[in-house]
Each structure stands twice: as structure tokens, then as C-alpha cells.
């Protein structure tokens, strides 16, 4: 069956079919997704480790905020640099490079020296801790911009959503792993050794090593190879992940776009600034990334235990209940992957933002109706926050990363997603830095009502500006984005849908 929205050229491609090449494509996606797993673990490990770390090192709230947000702000730089570097040296080499950053950053955090002056900003131990978090952030940011693009460029357009979406599944699996590992380590070693937070951070060295070893045997993106004029290598790669007939036909499509691009004098930033339609799509992509972060999802993933303690749970109850966030995030990712090639991206965004905004409102109302001290309060808020995380993961997180990985033209794909994800991480960092202060100042009630208000504005933004990308090859999307046709097609489809729904 032809994918929804496919062009005439795509309809002429041989059927995808089945065979050993499907298993090879699955193997590649699993190895590459170790980058997403590390992304998730390194962002989730602080949710549970920050308490013991602050207690042992004598860190203040603002210092903990710097430790958490150092990774996030560095990730913004890593996303921008990672995208540009992958355009230059290739997606595969960029992923191998980030595996070293993951390993080096983890070791710096684990080995940061303790001392009587560590609780001050100028102490060498604190500086080492921050430096390690910065290295991890650079790796996380690079992973967030390079791995989705690598998967999207390897995947056939019919199943691109589910293949590229596996990275987001790996991210939430990494976060769940961090929550479970934190609880197990705290429960088994907490009373026996000092510095259990170091053990929590040390665990991420294992997938970093697996990512490095695995990527040594993985192929380069065939689309990147064609863009660099290495056509024979691209065909060789395609033959391992497509049928023989499909590989040759798909290479011809990619080559056709590459030939058209060859007549363009500029690439990368020059090409972006010379085309108003590309500037528009970058601004929309920035908006999509910022919208994702302004749902407040990472305030839960970073500070979930703190939110639950604020609602009335004990520290032990909050640490255990926090695992529920990771479990439903993984469940939501599984559902999202099943729907990714069935539902339009815009529909998915609208459903997700509607559900998360409703959850925000209900959390705010519950915290007002159930005063502090009410035994039902923490458990009602837990259920509502779990519903929020499930809605977010099912309809927004996976879809956002897939959409970002496919919307940009080949000659500026790394740069485009790098710019968008840079802004995403900067907003993420702002939330990470100020959320503890926000909760302390206005409580759960004010915080979640604020998120709800932003959710309404986000719905209006998506409905008005975000174009559809599902079921269209990267080459067709490239033409439509470069000419601005993608916005016209989206408006036409929106109008048709509105007419069809009228009685």
C-alpha cells in the first residue's frame, strides 16, 4: 500500500518487501539508539542522585541547580556543534566521537575529588564535577541532533517514523533505567557506603563502551555519502538495508536531489540565510522544540522526587513512586512507535498538547482542593502527573524528535536540526535551573497552572504554523520545504479536513 501523501516518484519505487535487509536495518537502529539510551540515563540519573550528592558535598539549592542545568546548557551547544560536525565528517563518525564524550564525562563526575571546600563555587572538586557534567551535556546534545538524523536517513520513507522514533524510546528506557538503578543502589548500598551517587553515575560508562564498539561496525548514512559524491559507497550501504531493486531505485532518487543541489552555490548556513522558506522552517522547528520543553516534562524527569515530596510524600515514597514516571514513559513510547506511521504528525501534536494541558489544569486544581496534610493529596497528584507523562510520551516526545529529524533539506539537515535542538536545550536548561525556585515560590499549584497557560498558546502555534511530514520521502520534503510548497499543502489539507468534518 502506498504511504499517505507520497509523491508520484515515490509511488514508482519498488515495494519495500521483506528479507535479511530488514533485520540489518533493525540491528543498526539498536546500536545507534545506545546514544539515546545514554541521553536518557544521563538526564535521568540526577533525579535521585541529586539528594545524596547535595548532602555529601554540602551543596546549596542554587549549586544543585547549576549541576543539573550545566548538562542541559552544554547539551544546547552539543546539539548545534554535533549537527554541524556530522554534516562535515559524517553521522557515523560523529556518533563514535560522542561515545568518548559520554565515557569521559562520566569518569570526571565519578572521580571528582571531595573536600571541605567542595560546597563552594571555586573549589577544584566542584569545578571537576561541573566540567564532567558539561562533557556529558555536549554528548547528550550531539546525540539528540545526530542520532535521529542518522536513523531517518537510513530508514525507508514508509516506516521512517517508527525507525527514527526508536531513539526516543531508547531515551525514555534510559531514564527508566536511571530511576530503577538509583532506587536499587540507594536501597542496597545506601547504608553501607558513602558516595552512592558516584556509583549511579558510573553505570553509564557501560552503554558508552557498547556504543563505541557497536558503531565501529555500522555503515555511514547513504544520503550523506551521496551528498559527498561517494555514490558507490552509498549504493553498497543501501544494498544491505533494502532489496537490490529498491536500493538502486532509491539511490537514483537521492542522486537526483543531490544533482539539483549541486547547482546551488551555497550550503549550510549560507543556503539557509539565502532562502526565506528555509528561515521560516527553522523558526517553526525552533518553536516545536520550545513547545515540547514548555510542557514541563523535564521538570518531572529531573525533579520528580522533589515534586512528589512537595505534594506530601516521604523521601523514600517519592524515590519509589518516581519509577512510575519512567515506566509510563516507556509504555507511551511503545504506543507512539505503533502510531507513528499511522497518525499525521500534526494530529499527534494536537492530541498530545490537549491532553497535557488538561493534566496540568487538573494537577493545579487538585493541589487547591486537597490541602497539605490531606492523605489523598500526594496520591491524587501522583496519578495526574503519571497521566501527564503518559500523554506526553505517547503523543509528543517521539513525534517531535521524528518531525525534527525529517523536516530539513539534506544540505543543511545537520545545521537545521542543530539550531532547533540548541534552542530546545536552552529552554530545557532554563526550566532545569529555575524549576526548584519556581516550586518553592508559587508551589505545585502555580507551577502547573502556568504550564497549562503555555499549553493553550502552544496548541494555537501548532495549528497555525507546523506543516505535515508523514508518509513523504526526505527528497520530496526537501523540495517542498525549499520552495515553501509544504505550507500550502498543509493549509489545503487543513481546509479539506475542516470541510469533511462539517455535517
Image: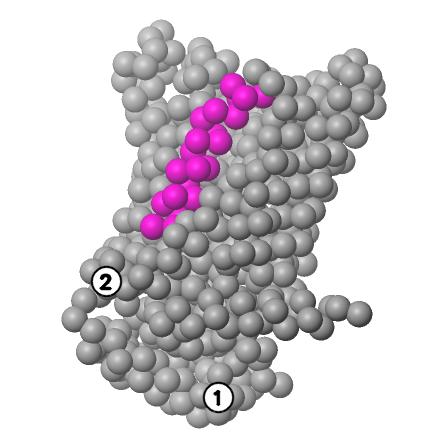
Residue positioned 16% across, 71% down in the render = 265
Residue range in magenta is 419-439
Q: Is residue 429 magenta?
A: yes
Q: In front: 52, or 312?
A: 312
Report the label total: 2
Residue positioned 71% across, 34% down in the render = 361
Residue 372 picture quarter: top right
Quarter of the figure that contains the C terminus: bottom right
Query: What residue did someone put label 1 on?
Result: 8
Main secondary-structure element of the magenta-colored stretch: helix
- Residue 325 appears left or right of 197: right
Residue 344, visible in the rendered structure: yes
Instruction: Say how the picture is coloured.
Output: one colour
Query: What residue did someone put label 2 on?
Result: 274
- Residue 230 appears left or right of 381: left
Q: Earlier in the sequence, mark 1 or mark 2?
A: 1
Image position, residue 426 (x, y; %): 39, 38
Q: Is residue 401 above or below residue 251?
A: above
- Residue 262 appears left or right of 444: left
CB atoms of marks 1 and 2 within 8 Å = no
Q: Is residue 493 above or below residue 196?
A: below
- Residue 469 appears left or right of 413: right
Image position, residue 33 (x, y; %): 47, 57
Residue positioned 46% across, 82% down in the render = 242
Residue positioned 64% across, 66% down in the render = 343
SS type, badge 2: loop
Image position, residue 154 (x, y; %): 42, 71
SS type, badge 1: helix
Amino acid at each position: 500500500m502506498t504511504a499517505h501523501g507520497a509523491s508520484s516518484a515515490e509511488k514508482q519505487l519498488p515495494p519495500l518487501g521483506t528479507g535479511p535487509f530488514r533485520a540489518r536495518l533493525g540491528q543498526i537502529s539498536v546500536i545507534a539508539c545506545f546514544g539515546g539510551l545514554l541521553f536518557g540515563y544521563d538526564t535521568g540519573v540526577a533525579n535521585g542522585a541529586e539528594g545524596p550528592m547535595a548532602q555529601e558535598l554540602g551543596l546549596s539549592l542554587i549549586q544543585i541547580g547549576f549541576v543539573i542545568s550545566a548538562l542541559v546548557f552544554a547539551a544546547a551547544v552539543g546539539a548545534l556543534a554535533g549537527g554541524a560536525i556530522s554534516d562535515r565528517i559524517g553521522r557515523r563518525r560523529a556518533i563514535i566521537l560522542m561515545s568518548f564524550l559520554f565515557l569521559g564525562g562520566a569518569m570526571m563526575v565519578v572521580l571528582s575529588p571531595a573536600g571541605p571546600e567542595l560546597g563552594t563555587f571555586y573549589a577544584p572538586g566542584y569545578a571537576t564535577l561541573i566540567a564532567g557534567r558539561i562533557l556529558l551535556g555536549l554528548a547528550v546534545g550531539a546525540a539528540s541532533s545526530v542520532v535521529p538524523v542518522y536513523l531517518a536517513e537510513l530508514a525507508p520513507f514508509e516506516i521512517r517514523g517508527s525507525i527514527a522514533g526508536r531513539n526516543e524510546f531508547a531515551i525514555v528506557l534510559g531514564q527508566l533505567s536511571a530511576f530503577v538503578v538509583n532506587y536499587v543502589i540507594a536501597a542496597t548500598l545506601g547504608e553501607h557506603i558513602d558516595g552512592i551517587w558516584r556509583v549511579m553515575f558510573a553505570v553509564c560508562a557501560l552503554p558508552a563502551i557498547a556504543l563505541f564498539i557497536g558503531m565501529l561496525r555500522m555503515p555511514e548514512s547513504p544520503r550523506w555519502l551521496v551528498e559527498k559524491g561517494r555514490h558507490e559507497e552509498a549504493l553498497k550501504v543501501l544494498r544491505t538495508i533494502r532489496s537490490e531493486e529498491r536500493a538502486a531505485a532509491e539511490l537514483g532518487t537521492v542522486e537526483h536531489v543531490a544533482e539539483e543541489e549541486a547547482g546551488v552555490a551555497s550550503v549550510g548556513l549560507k543556503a539557509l540565510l539565502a532562502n526565506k522558506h528555509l528561515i521560516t522552517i527553522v523558526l517553526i522547528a525552533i518553536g516545536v522544540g520550545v513547545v515540547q520543553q514548555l510542557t514541563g516534562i523535564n521538570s518531572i524527569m529531573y525533579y520528580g522526587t522533589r515534586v512528589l515530596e512537595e505534594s506530601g510524600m516521604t523521601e523514600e515514597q517519592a524515590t519509589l513512586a518516581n519509577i512510575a514516571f519512567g515506566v509510563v514513559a516507556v509504555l507511551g513510547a511503545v504506543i507512539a512507535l505503533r502510531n507513528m506511521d499511522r497518525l499525521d504528525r500534526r494530529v499527534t501534536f494536537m492530541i498530545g498538547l490537549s491532553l497535557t494541558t488538561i493534566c496540568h489544569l487538573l494537577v493545579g486544581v487538585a493541589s487547591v482542593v486537597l490541602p497539605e496534610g490531606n492523605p489523598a493529596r500526594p496520591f491524587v497528584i501522583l496519578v495526574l502527573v503519571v497521566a501527564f507523562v503518559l500523554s506526553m510520551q505517547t503523543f509528543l516526545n517521539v513525534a517531535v524528535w521524528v518531525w525534527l529529524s525529517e523536516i530539513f533539506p539534506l544540505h543543511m539537515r545537520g545545521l537545521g536540526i542543530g539550531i532547533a535542538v540548541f534552542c530546545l536545550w536552552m529552554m530545557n536548561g532554563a526550566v532545569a535551573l529555575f524549576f526548584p525556585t519556581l516550586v518553592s515560590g508559587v508551589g505545585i499549584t502555580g507551577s502547573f497552572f502556568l504550564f497549562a497557560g503555555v499549553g493553550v498558546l502552544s496548541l494555537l502555534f501548532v495549528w497555525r504554523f507546523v506543516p505535515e511530514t508523514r508518509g513523504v520521502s526526505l527528497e520530496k520534503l526537501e523540495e517542498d520545504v525549499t520552495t515553501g510548497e509544504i505550507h500550502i499543502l498543509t493549509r489545503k489539507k487543513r481546509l479539506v479536513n475542516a470541510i469533511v468534518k462539517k455535517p
